[in-house]
Image (cartoon, rainbow, N blue to C red):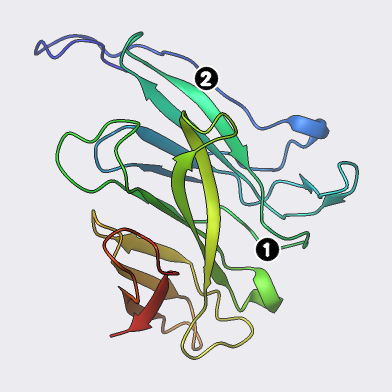
Amino acid sequence: FRSSITAGTAFSIQSSVTGTSGDDNTGKLGHSLSMSTDENFVVAGGPYTNSLGTDGSTRFANSGKIKIFVWDPATFKYGTLTTKLPPYDLANQNFGWAHKICEPGAGSVRSTPVKYMFVSAPGVGTDAGTVYMYEWGVGVDLSTYDTWTQNLTITSSDPGSNKRFGHQLEANDNGDILAISSVAPGKAGKVEIFRRTSQSTDDSVQHSFTLV
């Protein structure tokens, strides 16, 4: 991390994070990394993490997780915001294999709406794969922007086992153009490009994506 814009300033370690919860040393946190458009968020994926289920005790092998870090302009540092687990209790889904946070507009800050996050889980459904969409908003205090809420599941237009839809993904700043790759058919690979539709300007209509 370089804390000054002065040319030649040395980079130094701000902090380090490992993924060893529950004595799980196979999660591979950092297998995937992404930074949001305006650098407010850094996301690290650990798609081989044996994540806890919703019962708080059962671990699901290779279920996966992501850790989200948020920029604090007061301290000029990134701090841990949250750890997101898969929406469903399933083994081998590799949640966090790829991800992207979209921040529309120049100069976006933590409280600037609207932000979207896409996280892939290419192991879901015998490696058929899926991508989850999240939206940034206020939390339990109804005033602080600190919560990512999952509101849509995106699947391939031609789903099938062993395709691993969500192998890689990319989106534009507004989060309304989304490209998602699969490793199959065979090993030839495939890319599907989606456009966000059925969405009003005030976000009052449920999200959907259409293949283009």
Say if 52 sits above or below 125 in the image.
above
Q: Residue at x 52, y 25 (%)?
A: 80
**Which numbered circle lies on residue 93?**
1
Quarter occupied by the N terminus: top left
What is the three-letter code of the residue carrying label 1?
A: Gln
Q: Is residue 157 left or right of residue 161?
A: left
For residue 191, say whether it is visible.
no
According to the picture, the residue beneath numbered tag 2 turns out to be: 16
How dense is the environment of label 1, judged by Cα within 10 Å: few (below 14), some, or many (20 and up)? many
Say whether disc 2 or disc 1 marks the residue closer to the N-terminus. 2
Q: At numbered mark 1, what does the secondary structure look like: helix, strand or loop?
A: loop
Say if 94 sits above or below 162 in the image.
above
Quarter occupied by the C terminus: bottom left
- Front in this rendered view, residue 204 or 165: 204
Q: Residue at x 31, y 44 (%)?
A: 113
Q: Residue at x 23, y 53 (%)?
A: 173
Pointers 2 and 1 in contact (CB under 8 A)? no
Q: Is residue 34 left or right of residue 52?
A: left
**Which numbered circle lies on residue 10?**
none
- Residue 203, percent from left and from top: 36, 60
For residue 60, say whether it is visible.
yes
Residue 105 falls in image quadrant: top left
- Residue 57, percent from left and from top: 90, 42
- Front in this rendered view, residue 165 or 117: 117
- Residue 187, percent from left and from top: 47, 82
- Front in this rendered view, residue 47 or 120: 120
Say if 62 sits above or below 2 in the image.
below
What is the three-letter code of the residue carrying label 2?
A: Ser
Say if 183 sits above or below 3 in the image.
below
Residue 189 falls in image quadrant: bottom left
Gap between marks 2 and 1 measured at Cα: 26 Å
